[in-house]
Image: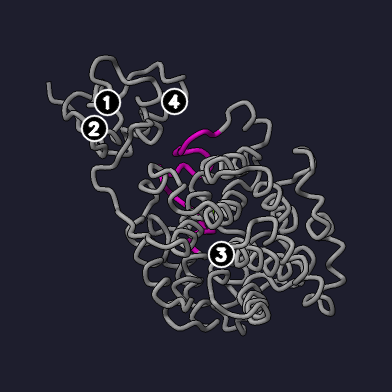
């Protein structure tokens, strides 16, 4: 009998169905083929599970197998603490996004019943393993524009290309884009001045500019210049003062971490900066950031932490996560299991945690599974070369 050769997508479908059925159906996961312990032609056993069958969770994803090691690993040459933080921050962001994508917009109750413990596929957008979303695409666009000689025009042009041509996306399409960002990009296409493209009403305070602002934190510039840059970069899609201040706080905090401050010290310095340097233009906004500026957010109970997609809620959740967990992995998994805007919150918290705990602390299985890893690595290599430390 002629045997039908299944495509990768079809195999994944079978695996996903197996997952839904509690993995009672035995399937041959295609990911095993990428593992250096794979024994060709014997899907039920490998060099690690020689005697007994692989456990159930291995059946549908070596991404969930503790022994998984890629046959074609991408190696990173990281020798200094600074590089450990830089690669950790940027990849930590991408990985947070990637872990959050399959469960974006699911509820906290759903996540407490079925907590994410590992990399998953499918879910909200029906994407494969390792796929990240618009947060990472637009963050990468910012890095690319910094490498190529920064200008807002260049950045805006990259945003248009992300949106229209799928540039900087894992599979050539942007499958998830916020409303404000989409409208702003339409404005860019119409020829509106980049700094005037973003919405400026109180309703334009989703987390769409905060989610892509991270790379500015790695530039060796003064706090004042950093603030100005955040304001202009944010304004391309979001130019209400609340969004600007959220970006200023996040970037300032991460840059303090990158300079080597403990998270407590980094937080204190950021609050001092806001109170001294963001007084005149932003004092009217301080009331909305009260729990952050008074540091009460870090001691809040779980049910007082919101994950709605509103920029202040997002920033609060990030501080809460950073101060309530003590490893990269725990920070990201806790972020995703808060439910709601999981990809953005896990990306932003993952960016902080990656800087704090470093690239070396991130699970290699997650790193090796990032879609377009080679391209992202090259981008960070190029970015690092432009940084003057
Ligand atoms: Mg997203």
Mark 2 secondary-structure assignment: loop
Q: Distance from label 2 to label 4 (Cα)?
A: 23 Å
The residue to which callout 1 is attached is 48
Q: Main secondary structure of the magenta part?
A: loop
The residue to which callout 2 is attached is 37
The circle drawn on residue 88 is none
In screen coordinates, is 75 left or right of 93?
left
Q: Distance from label 4 to label 1 (Cα)?
A: 22 Å
Mark 3 secondary-structure assignment: helix
Mark 1, residues whose alpha carbon is within 10 Å: few (<14), some, or many (≥20)?
some
**Image quadrant where one finds the N terminus:** top left
The residue to which callout 4 is attached is 19
Visible residue check, residue 212: no
Q: Distance from label 3 to label 2 (Cα)?
A: 37 Å
Q: Residue 248: x percent and y percent?
A: 69, 70
Mark 4 secondary-structure assignment: helix
Mark 4 or mark 1: which comes first in sequence?
4
Mark 1 or mark 3: which comes first in sequence?
1
Mark 2 or mark 1: which comes first in sequence?
2
**Which mark is in front, 3 or 2?**
3
Mark 2, residues whose alpha carbon is within 10 Å: few (<14), some, or many (≥20)?
some
Q: Residue 191: x percent and y percent?
A: 57, 83
Is 346 part of what is drawn in magenta?
A: no
Residue plotted at (62% across, 51% down): 345
Residue plotted at (70% across, 73% down): 239
Q: Are marks 2 and 1 in contact (CB under 8 Å)?
A: yes
Q: Are marks 1 and 3 in contact (CB under 8 Å)?
A: no
Visible residue check, residue 116: yes
Residue plotted at (74% across, 62% down): 268
């Amino acid at each position: 009998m002629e045997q039908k050769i299944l495509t990768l997508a079809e195999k994944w479908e079978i695996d996903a169905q197996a997952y839904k059925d509690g993995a009672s159906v035995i399937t041959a996961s295609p990911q095993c083929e990428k593992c250096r312990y794979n024994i060709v032609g014997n899907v039920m056993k490998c060099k690690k599970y020689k005697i007994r069958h692989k456990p159930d969770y291995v059946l549908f994803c070596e991404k969930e197998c503790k022994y998984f090691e890629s046959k074609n690993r991408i190696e990173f040459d990281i020798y200094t603490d600074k590089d450990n933080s830089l690669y950790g921050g940027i990849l930590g962001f991408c990985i947070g996004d990637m872990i959050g994508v399959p469960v974006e917009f699911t509820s906290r109750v759903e996540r407490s019943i079925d907590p994410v413990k590992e990399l998953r596929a499918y879910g909200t957008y029906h994407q494969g393993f390792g796929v990240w979303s618009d947060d990472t695409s637009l963050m990468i666009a910012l890095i690319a524009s910094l490498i190529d000689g920064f200008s807002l025009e260049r950045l805006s042009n990259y945003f248009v290309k992300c949106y229209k041509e799928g540039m900087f996306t894992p599979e050539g399409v942007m499958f998830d884009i916020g409303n404000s960002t989409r409208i702003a990009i339409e404005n860019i296409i119409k020829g509106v001045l980049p700094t005037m493209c973003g919405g400026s009403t109180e309703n334009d305070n989703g987390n769409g500019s905060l989610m892509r602002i991270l790379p500015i934190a790695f530039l060796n510039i003064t706090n004042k210049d950093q603030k100005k840059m955040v304001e202009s970069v944010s304004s391309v899609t979001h130019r209400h003062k609340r969004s600007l201040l959220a970006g200023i706080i996040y970037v300032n905090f991460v840059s303090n971490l990158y300079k080597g401050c403990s998270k407590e010290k980094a937080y204190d310095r950021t609050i001092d900066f806001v109170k001294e340097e963001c007084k005149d233009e932003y004092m009217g906004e301080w009331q909305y950031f009260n729990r952050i500026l008074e540091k009460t957010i870090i001691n809040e109970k779980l049910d007082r932490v919101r994950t709605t997609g509103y920029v202040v809620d997002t920033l609060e959740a990030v501080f809460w996560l950073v101060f309530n967990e003590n490893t990269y992995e725990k920070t990201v998994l806790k972020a995703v299991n808060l439910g709601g805007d999981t990809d953005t919150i896990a990306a932003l918290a993952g960016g902080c945690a990656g800087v704090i705990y470093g690239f070396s602390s991130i699970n290699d299985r997650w790193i090796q599974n990032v879609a377009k890893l080679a391209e992202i690595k090259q981008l960070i290599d190029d970015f690092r070369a432009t940084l003057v430390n």
